Amino acid sequence: MIVLGLTGSIGMGKSTTAKLFAEAGVPVYDADATVHKIYEGEAAPLIEAAFPGTTASGKVDRQKLSSRVVHDPAAMKQLETIVHPLLRSHHKAFLDDAERSGAPVAVVDVPLLYETGGETRVDAVVVVTTSPEIQRERILARPNMDAAKLDAILARQLPDAEKRKRADFVVDTSHGLDPVRASVRDILAAAATLPQRRA
């Protein structure tokens, strides 16, 4: 089974691209959705212990947690040491299931793939991109988002140009869904011939 790492900076269209892989019948692991799940379960007591007052009714309050860590690199590091091991075990279970199901290709959708060294755990990397103007427009249209928060998020992410340079495949989401669908088809055809290279 070939494992594709799907990544891209915030607002690039990564979630839409992941949906198109799923539509094509590919098992897709969604790191963000898994974070949501563990924030409502196993991670909540650990996060409350590290950051008192950031949970309510046994679930992490994402707004409170975000305001506590977004501008504090040390707090962000501490949060990652709690969350990443839990994510890794969910990730492994997903790959085991996909392998057992006989899927030829699986996609792991990880926003901070390069930033966390995740490219060594996949066989090829797909980077989703768009123009900086479209990116900003998409993000600033989101609820609870402002320019300062956006800049703090972008500061933690590898620049788009660097991601594209390191990618095996690049998907541009600037021109609507049809070209993205075509890119997904091309990538899946190419993936069938790729060697396994993950660690």
Image (tube, rainbow, N blue to C red):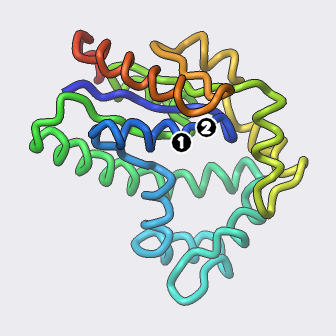
Q: Is residue 91 above or below residue 116?
A: below
Q: Position of residue 198 (x, y in %)?
A: 29, 22
Q: Quadrant of residue 189?
A: top left
Q: Is residue 89 left or right of residue 102?
A: right
Q: Are marks 1 and 2 in contact (CB under 8 Å)?
A: yes
Which residue lies most toward the front here? 178
Q: Is residue 10 left or right of residue 81?
A: right
- Residue at 50% x, 69% y is 39
- Amino acid of disc 2: Gly
Residue 69, numbered label: none
Quadrant into which the C terminus falls: top left
- Amino acid of disc 1: Thr
Which residue lies most toward the bottom here? 57
Judge the density around disc 1: few (<14), some (14-19), many (≥20) Cα neighbours within 10 Å. some
Q: Position of residue 44 (x, y in %)?
A: 50, 74
Q: Position of residue 25 (x, y in %)?
A: 27, 40
Judge the density around disc 2: few (<14), some (14-19), many (≥20) Cα neighbours within 10 Å. many
Quadrant into which the N terminus falls: top left
Residue 13, numbered label: 2
Q: Quadrant of residue 18?
A: top left
Q: What residue is pinned by disc 1? A: 16
- Residue at 46% x, 32% y is 6
- Residue at 76% x, 24% y is 131
Q: Is residue 58 left or right of residue 99?
A: right
Q: Position of residue 7 (x, y in %)?
A: 53, 32
- Disc 1/disc 2 C-alpha distance (Å): 5 Å
Q: Is residue 15 left or right of residue 95?
A: right
